[in-house]
Amino acid sequence: MANVSRASLDQKLALAKRCSREATLAGAKAAAVATVASAVPTLASVRMLPWAKANINPTGQALIISTVAGMAYFIAADKKILSLARRHSFEEAPDHLKNTSYQGASRPHPAFFRP
């Protein structure tokens, strides 16, 4: 195993903490938006539609809204973690691996192939 310094471990730990904080904030923002976006039609349908009024009690309404908010939180946080990991792995890659353009066809790859 390679000799790892205390400073590099501290630096990696600080980076991990910053990334997890960014992911938490992204997830919380997505959950807030999803809560409003799911609460409005859920509550409106319970008031207006006879089927929903008869079959969706307040517990069911809360379950619908909280499930959407939880899914939005985890999806947004996961996307943020993956994008940060991809960006940081590209930054730490050797120079010969950073060149992602393909010169054989005399034109570079489309932008979605680049990090």
Image (cartoon, rainbow, N blue to C red):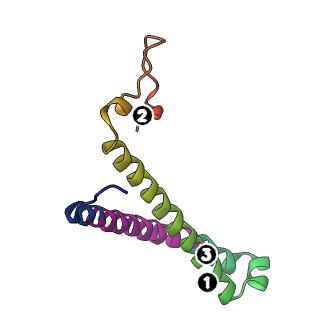
Tell me the mark number nearer the camera, choosing from 1 and 3.
3
Q: Is residue 63 toward the left or the right of residue 87 in the image?
A: right
Callout 3 secondary element: helix
Magenta: main secondary structure: helix
Give the number of the mark in front: 1 or 2: 2
Labels 1 and 2 touching (C-beta < 8 A): no
Where residue 82 sits in the image (x, y, percent)?
Answer: 46, 54
The reply, left or right, for residue 105 in relation to residue 19 is right
The Cα atoms of the two marked residues, 2 and 3, are separated by: 35 Å
Residue 33 inside the magenta-drawn segment: yes
Residue type marked 2: Arg
Residue 39 location (% of width, % of height) = 56, 75
Amino acid identity at mark 1: Ala
In the image, 18 versus 45, the foreground residue is 18
Residue for point 54% across, 72% down: 69
Question: Disc 1 or 3, which lies upstream in sequence?
Answer: 1
| Mark closer to the observer (2, 3) | 2
Image position of 58 (left or right of 32): right
Instruction: Report the residue at 57% width, 69% height from top.
Output: 71
Where does the magenta region start and end? 13-38
Quarter of the rendering containing residue 18: bottom left
Quadrant showing the C terminus: top left
Badge 1 density bin: few <14, some 14–19, many ≥20, Cα 10 Å: some
- Label 3: which residue? 67
Distance from disc 1 to disc 2, alpha carbons, whole Å, reads 42 Å
Task: Measuring from the top left, give residue 46's x and y in whole percent.
Answer: 68, 79
Disc number placed over residue 62 in the picture, else none: 1
Q: Which SS class for mark 1?
A: helix
Residue position for label 2: 114
Q: How many marks?
A: 3
For label 3, the crowd category at 10 Å Cα-Cα, with few meaning under 14, some 14 to 19 and many 20 or more, is some
